[in-house]
Image (tube, rainbow, N blue to C red):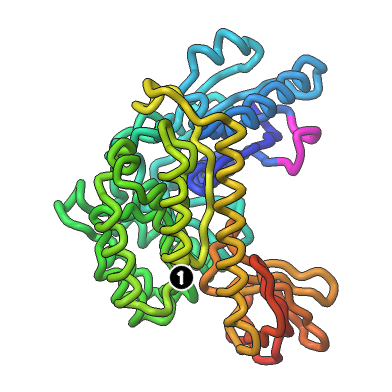
Amino acid sequence: MTHNLFLLSLGCSKNTVDAERLMAQAEASGIHFTESADESDTILINTCGFIEDAKQESIAEMLAAIEKKVEGKVQKVFVMGCLSELYRKELTEEMPEIDGFFGTRELPDVLAAIGASYRAELYDHRTLLTPKHYAFLKIAEGCNRSCSFCSIPKIRGGYQSQPVEQLLREATLLQQHGVKELNLIAQDISMFGYDTTGKSMLNELVLQLSDMAFDWIRLLYAYPVNFPLEVIDTMRKRANVCNYLDIPLQHCNDRILHSMRRGINKQETITLLETIREKNPDICLRTTMIVGYPGETRQEFEELLQFVEKTRFERLGSFAYCHEEYTSSFSMDDSVSAEEKQQRVTELMELQETIAIENNHHFEGKNITILIDEVEDDIAFGRTEYDAPEVDNECILSTETVKVTVGSFYKATISDSSAYELYGVVDEKQLS
């Protein structure tokens, strides 16, 4: 039996939740998790397999773990997660030193391999890998969309909404452990409830979570098709539902959107965004764009630049298209060179930086609510309600004579800003 286990969880927040579930189950069987691989007798790697860079990171960590095993520093190495789901056969052949490969839906098998037992009554329990004041709540598994560039349906299977009552139990446990900010995630939160009730249940879930008096509730990864607009009304009415929506659009050109199988065109996208902002003028919209998609011309890319410049997203990330196996676009000619893809990413992000500078300038001179994530000496690092953990802007604040604690809310006066930071001073009043 494993006694000391080092768990390395790579990739997205959905992977993080999987790792947290595993830890809670394993700890109930007496397994101790170590801070470093050097203190362990077993290494377990939770891999990401979504894009090439993530695959390479996962492989590098697997090779490093094998080296420790060969040197006798650890006894066993196990691999789970997305990359293992996609390439188990190939990995098994190429890395026979690995003691076991497991996919994304084999938690009981992973636990058995490390000498632990799966307990159904502990399904709601998680050992947080995030700071204790915020957590992710995964409201669904899998995806039914057929986006041409995405392998998630292959990795995670079809869409499965979690039962509302189970999510409320899980949220209660998180709150009891000190979580103040709840970030709702899924591959597609827009479809929550369709598979179980035939209609969207997202707004009902948000309302019930809001009634539980979390300080902040945040919505991440909303697909633009079938998005329930009543959620935006709730966001405006409920103070603890952040004025924030992550809604990945990927592109705006009609030909590319059709080829991507996104189920929406440019004008429908514009109408949706205009409606959201009309319903809630204070909303912060975050999106992601893919550049260098097969056949993307310079003219189509410039159309995307014009769209971003006109729409003025508060937050935006950009990715170079990755030609991935197990996606329908893999059969297309990956015609845009790697150099050109990277140049387009740079160009788009430079445009977004100018927009972000102008947006952040509006915070200067204002007194706003900040959640503190970290404190170093007399400097506090925090976020506004318009910033999701790990991916968005940061507030860098002088605490002066104020004693500031991590995980608490304060008012701060903003004096300066840049594209991705706000600077200011924490006021004395602590909100919670």
Residue ID for mark 1: 284
Query: Residue shown at 61%/31% (left/top)?
Result: 45
Q: Quadrant of the N terminus?
A: top right
Instruction: Tell me, yes or no, if residue 108 can be seen here.
Output: no
Judge by depth and name the residue closer to the eye, 79 or 281: 281
Judge by depth and name the residue closer to the eye, 359 or 5: 359
Helix, strand or loop at mark 1: strand
Query: Residue shown at 63%/28% (left/top)?
Result: 56
Instruction: Tell me, yes or no, if residue 339 can be seen here.
Output: yes
Q: Residues within 10 Å of mark 1 (few under 14, many from 20)?
A: some
The magenta stretch spans residue 23 = no
Task: Indicate whether 152 appears above or below 85.
Answer: below
Q: Disc 1 marks which amino acid?
A: Cys
- Image quadrant assignment for residue 34: top right
Q: Which residues are magenta?
A: 34-40
Query: Residue shown at 39%/46% (left/top)?
Result: 187
Judge by depth and name the residue closer to the eye, 25 or 130: 130
Q: Quadrant of the C terminus?
A: bottom right
- Image quadrant assignment for residue 7: top right
Residue 99 on image: x %, y %: 61, 17
Query: Would you say 201 lies left or right of 244 here?
Result: left
- Image quadrant assignment for residue 157: top left
